[in-house]
Amino acid sequence: MKKTKAASLIFIIALIMCPGSLIHTQAADYALSAKKSFDIAILNKDGTDNYNDQDLYFEVQHTKTGKLKKNMSISCTIYVPVSALKKNNEFILLDPSLVLCTKKNGQLQYTGRIVGKYGLQLQYDAHQRKVVLWKHAQDVVTGVGKYGSFTRKGNYYVVKMKNIPLMNKYFTDNPDNMKKINTKKAYYLLSNLRVFRMGKSEWTGTFYIDNLQLKSTSTQKVTFNKKDYADIGAFNFGKDGNMKVKVKKVPG
């Protein structure tokens, strides 16, 4: 009996001092997911297009209100299915923004949107995949630099968006009518990620976003491994409207 107690005591001490050496468990990693069917992207000669139908918007409301400051930034990890890019010159655009809201009678009231200075494009170009930086103001792409990277994990490309700076102005309805941000007022903050597919074929797949981080006057992180967000949603401005979202284990 004494030997049994002594052995138990040694095990408990070892567990406290070196837990990783005795128990090899790893918590599951979760992410926000949505499934979307995309058509062939069409731009007509008269300038009309079906691009609204090729968008998927993820939206995450942060748990705390916050004040704004200049040079805020958004980071996140996006899981893009490998099958989304099959043909040359197809690409996925990942475009961050921040939605500002106030509250009236218990309901959020839209105030405006701050767009990112840049977006990331995951391209299938000359039969190879690469990530480039899309500049809003000039509508051009350049080297991604410090703002992004990607790797392949099974059937997904894991794209990391790193501290994409937000503009210091916001718009309400018309993106051409920009207003300076109010740094003295607190808003309800909703981080937003637009996923746009420029495809030459119809395709359906599931995207995931994870490790969302908003840097403002404070840093708010959302891992989706617990209820560290106030609300979540997905939508587009085309035929889909509001879409279903789920918090699921990351793929791979």
Image (spheres, grey):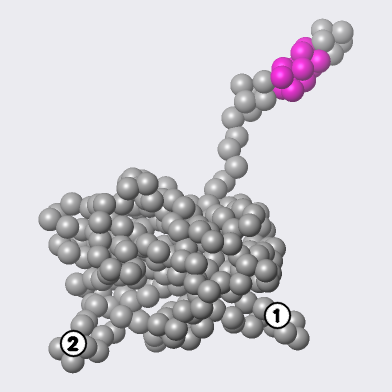
The segment highlighted magenta reads: 7-17
The image position of residue 107, as x and y in percent, is 70, 83
The residue shown at (30%, 62%) is: 134
- Is 8 in the magenta? yes
Q: Circle 1 sits on which residue?
A: 103
Which of label 1 and label 2 is nearer to you? 1
The image position of residue 124, as x and y in percent, is 20, 58
The residue shown at (29%, 84%) is: 50
Three-letter amino acid code at the position of disc 2: Asn
Q: Residues within 10 Å of mark 2 (few under 14, many from 20)?
A: few
Nearer the observer, 251 or 187: 187
Three-letter amino acid code at the position of disc 1: Lys
Q: Is residue 172 above or below residue 217?
A: below
Q: Earlier in the sequence, mark 1 or mark 2?
A: 2
Measure the C-alpha gap from mark 1 to mark 2: 41 Å
**Farthest bottom residue?**
46
The residue shown at (36%, 62%) is: 119
**Farthest left residue?**
126
- Is 210 in the magenta? no
Q: What is the quadrant of residue 63 in the picture? A: bottom right
Q: Is residue 155 left or right of residue 200?
A: right
Nearer the observer, 12 or 219: 219
Query: Chief secondary structure of the magenta span?
Result: helix
Q: Is residue 223 visible?
A: yes
Residue 44's tag is 2
